[in-house]
Image (tube, grey):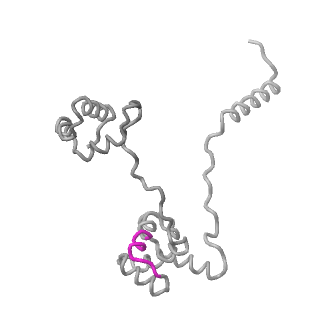
Amino acid sequence: MKYSTRKRRQSLEWHNLNGCNVAATSRQFGVSRSTLYRWLRRYDPDKPSKPLRAHSRKPHNKRKPLWSKHHLAALADISARHPEWGRRRLHWALAARGWHVSDSTVGRMLSLVNRKCPVCRKKGFHVFPSHLLRRDVISMGFTYPLVNPPRRSKVHASKKARDAAVREAEEIIRSEYGEREP
């Protein structure tokens, strides 16, 4: 259960006013003793405006992956050939190829491949012919993909470009038909 900073501060002030009894304070506010001790460590009566909110539990360092796109593509190939295999069998297949990683690492890699295959560029499933095509193209010495995917063009021109086009059209109309007074 999360407690607001106001409730934390209120319980600590009550704690200080009523004899600094941790057991009585925890009963009064329905907070465990360990939580109350943690709040007391953070609380400074000389600086009552100091925040009492919870600290982040996010890790400071995130582990870097041990694989490259080449490894993901190899795993995607094997997975496309044998879609019924799980992480353990895929681990054995990679170990037979000489790449020794744990089956939990293979599971993490497989979840990445299932989110978006680096070969098919599809979500959730593999198209095995695209894996074969990729392997054949690479064996011929070309890079894959052969053509960069087309970029989306802007459908609407910007406001300035539209205004300029309108002004140019008005000038052409004026020059052709002459300026007419209403």
Can you say which quadrant of the picture contains the N terminus? top left
Determine if the magenta segment contains residue 50.
no
Taking the view exactly as shown, the residue that stands out farthest to the top is: 182
In this picture, residue 157 sits left or right of residue 123: right
Q: Position of residue 58 (x, y in %)?
A: 42, 53
Q: Position of residue 84 (x, y in %)?
A: 35, 77
Of the pair 64 and 111, the residue shown nearer to us:
64
In this picture, residue 87 sits left or right of residue 145: left
> Splitting the image into 4 quarters, where does residue 107 fall?
bottom left
Rendered position, 26 above or below 10: below
Of the pair 88 and 83, the residue shown nearer to us:
88
Rendered position, 169 above or below 73: above
In this picture, residue 62 sits left or right of residue 170: left
Rendered position, 68 above or below 31: below
Can you say which quadrant of the picture contains the C terminus? top right
> Splitting the image into 4 quarters, where does residue 158 fall?
top right
- Residue range of the region highlighted in magenta in the rendering: 100-109
Of the pair 108 and 84, the residue shown nearer to us:
108
